[in-house]
Amino acid sequence: MEVNPTLTWLFEKYQENPNASWDISECFNSEISHPSHHIHALGNYLVQKGFVRNPTHLDTGGFTCSITTHGIVQVSDVLNEVKYLILEAAIEQDRFSVMDILDVDPNHLKRAHDYTNYLKRTGIIECIFHKDDILATPTFYGREWYNANKRTYAN
């Protein structure tokens, strides 16, 4: 199964528009035929592993879904980078607006929600969710992680 290439493709699409679902059959080389049962099996596997959400089997043989933060972790280090940026801004600069810290387009609020929910679930930050922004403050564990890792991430 082409799990990592599919997740990488879904992550690229997620960065373009985190609000959409994508047909994973579009990520395959069009010169190679992939039967619909193969696409559906791959989609079902990704759902079982928790790598994607919002699955839909299409009558045309496709399978639409969107990537989860668990799927993102499989193919990108972006969540560690986001963790560092949010903690650095909150601890060193007294900045708490995630939309400002990450310079997220207002149309991509969902991406900021996904990232902060992930960091909240891992115990790194506490959040206050507003209609068009998220305020994040580091937890004790988040401060410990930042102090232990800031040399690794410092420019």
Image (spheres, rainbow, N blue to C red):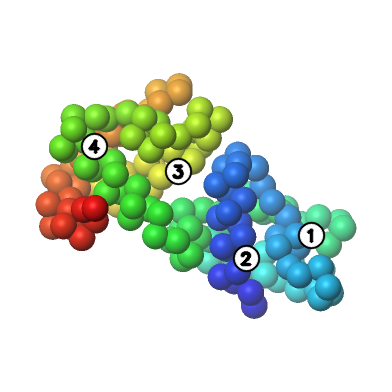
Q: Residues within 10 Å of mark 4 (few under 14, many from 20)?
A: many
Q: Are marks 2 and 4 in contact (CB under 8 Å)?
A: no
Q: What residue does disc 3 label?
A: 114
Tag 1: amino acid: Gly
Rounded to the nearest whole Å, what is the CA distance between mark 1 and mark 2?
Answer: 13 Å
Q: Secondary structure at mark 2?
A: helix
Q: Secondary structure at mark 1?
A: loop
Query: Residue extending furthest top?
Result: 131
Ranked by sequence position, the earlier of labels 4 and 1 is 1
Report the mark closest to the observer, 2 or 4: 4
Q: What residue does disc 4 label?
A: 89
Q: Secondary structure at mark 3?
A: helix
Q: Secondary structure at mark 4?
A: helix
Report the mark closest to the observer, 2 or 3: 2
Q: What residue does disc 2 label?
A: 6
Rounded to the nearest whole Å, what is the CA distance between mark 3 and mark 1?
Answer: 25 Å
Q: Residues within 10 Å of mark 3 (few under 14, many from 20)?
A: some
Q: What residue does disc 1 label?
A: 62
Report the mark closest to the observer, 1 or 2: 2
Rounded to the nearest whole Å, what is the CA distance between mark 2 and mark 3?
Answer: 20 Å
Query: Residue extending furthest right?
Result: 60
What residue sits 75% from the left and 62% below the top? 25
Q: Name the quarter where the N terminus is drawn.
A: bottom right
Tag 2: amino acid: Thr
Tag 3: amino acid: Asp
Q: Quadrant of residue 94?
A: top left
- Does residue 146 sit above or below 28 in this rendering? above
Q: Are marks 4 and 3 in contact (CB under 8 Å)?
A: no
Ranked by sequence position, the earlier of labels 3 and 1 is 1
